[in-house]
Amino acid sequence: MNAKRVSPRRSGVAPSSGGELHKGSPVFLALTAIGVVFGDIGTSPLYTLSVTLAATGHAPPTTADVLGIVSLIFWALMAMVSLKYVVLVLRADNDGEGGILALLSVVESDRIANGPGLSIFVLLGIVGAALLYGDGAITPAISVLSAVEGLKLVAPALDEFIVPLTLAILVGLFMIQRRGTGKIGRLFGPVMVAWFVVIGLLGAVNIYAAPAILKALSPGEAARFIVANPLIAFAVMGGVFLALTGAEALYADMGHVGPSAIRRAWFGLVLPALLLNYFGQGALILTTPNAADSPFYKLAPEWALLPLVGLATLATIIASQALISGVFSLTRQAMQLGLCPRMRIVPTSSEEAGQIYLPTANWLLMICTLFIVVLFKTSRNLAGAYGIAVSGTMLVTTILLYRVAVERWRWPPAAAIFMIVVFGTVDATFLASNSLKIVEGGWFPITVGAFMVGLMLCWRQGASLTRHRLQEMSMPLARFIGHIDEMVVARPPGVGVWMTKVAHGASPVLLHHV
């Protein structure tokens, strides 16, 4: 009996199929999504606006800077996260799984592991997946560092304890991964709900105090900012991109909770809270320009600062979960596609097939993350390394999405091309802007990505050679059955199962035993 690897069902034809694989309570799945999927993008307000305003070179920032940048963040969230990822990309599931390798298998499943050559789409998919590994190592480091650094505002003397405390928190985070996505979601979900409610309220209070910030809802403010000084706007785009950095992880984690839960959580709580907070930070800077160095924490009154630092620390610990879970899913897909060595996979749920734990991937990711914290030491230094990897992955996702739209969703080519041109232009702009940070730290995720590309290509080549050699040593199944019927072979009762990588025919091991 052949136990061959079967390519997963291409469910791009039926966009709703992914949701049918998740039978849990809609409320519980949405809560799990808030706790597992949205941590990365949900904690971006901690550093996005301060880093972006610093890129203008104006201290303090001007009113035009604030309105233009907040407008850019608003429209980037609406177009690139809400429309591109939540509405469109989540439809491109592969048997309920998400992520760039799942998207690649939808459009190129026959050529990833078995193709004689390497198509441009397969190569792009491998590069995009490799870059996501680099992002997966950086996200836990910058998320936890940015929150723990809030202790300096409470007590400057605690500065020397920031790195050791960050390392301790990260070790604890990776140690609980074996509990599984479901249990972690139940643990983290209520905390993240509290986080989104709090940041939304803080933003709303400050918007009420300075409603002029609502002018940023107009795309005209973003356009005026870009036209006034294109060079500054280009540099600023790398900071604006920080507001979107959890979008690719959102897609990679789809297998854990399903697309419906992600959409409910995004539009019902996460997006409104993020917009209120970004606009609230902008409102605060309009009235107090000197708050631009740390606008998030200065949203809160002095008495609430310490509790906010504590909540932010918990939220950023949870933020790391989105990329960690995404790396687990990505690694399993890479193994299924013959792109990386096999590792032990531990299912963590009896109901959700997408909820898994990979010990080897977990500990390797932990070592890499701890090294990054020791190497860069501050979130401001890490901001230079953050963004270039995930912006490259997002551009690759856009390119692959064209094939899905035309071949699976049956879109007219003109409509698909229009979509790709719009999204691709924005993604390319973000990638080019983030490329300015290569010297400041962007070299690190590129180095990690290059190593992973080399590993995947080498493993793919070795697996292909092994598979072809096994095929040469095998015997056509019809010939084997006819031959064995002519032989005197002992037939004990029961059924014999022979596991083999040979897709067609009797395996060499079976031939040897018979």
Image: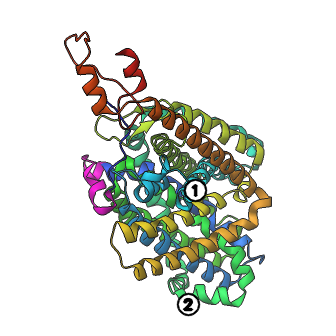
* Whole-percent x, y for residue 310 in the image: 57, 48
Which residue is farthest left? 493
Q: Earlier in the sequence, mark 1 or mark 2?
A: 1
- Which residue is labeled 1 in the image? 123
Inter-mark Cα distance, 1 to 2: 39 Å
Q: Amino acid at mark 2?
A: Gly
Q: Residue at x 73, y 70 (%)?
A: 54
Which residue is farthest right? 439
* Whole-percent x, y for residue 389 in the image: 63, 57
Look at the numbered discs 1 and 2 and tell me whether their residues touch, using CB distance below 8 Å: no
Q: Is residue 244 visible?
A: no
- Which residue is labeled 2 in the image? 220
Q: Residue at x 34, y 61 (%)?
A: 12
Q: What secondary structure is found at the residue carrying circle 2? A: helix
Instruction: Name the mark on residue 423.
Output: none
Which stretch did the figure color magenta?
11-28
Q: Amino acid at mark 1?
A: Leu
Closer to the camera in the image, 325 or 463? 463
Tag in front: 1 or 2: 1
Q: Is residue 14 visible?
A: yes
Q: Residues within 10 Å of mark 2 (few under 14, many from 20)?
A: some
Q: Image quarter for residue 383?
A: bottom right
Tell me, yes or no, whether the highlighted magenta stretch contains residue 27: yes
Tell me, yes or no, whether the highlighted magenta stretch contains residue 179: no
Q: What secondary structure is found at the residue carrying circle 1? A: helix
Locate the C terminus by quadrant: top left
Say whether residue 117 is left or right of residue 477: right
Q: Image quarter for residue 267?
A: bottom left
Closer to the camera in the image, 11 or 16? 11
Asked if residue 104 is positioned above or below residue 482 in the image, the reply reads below
Asked if residue 42 is positioned above or below residue 65 in the image, the reply reads above
* Whole-percent x, y for residue 3 in the image: 34, 32
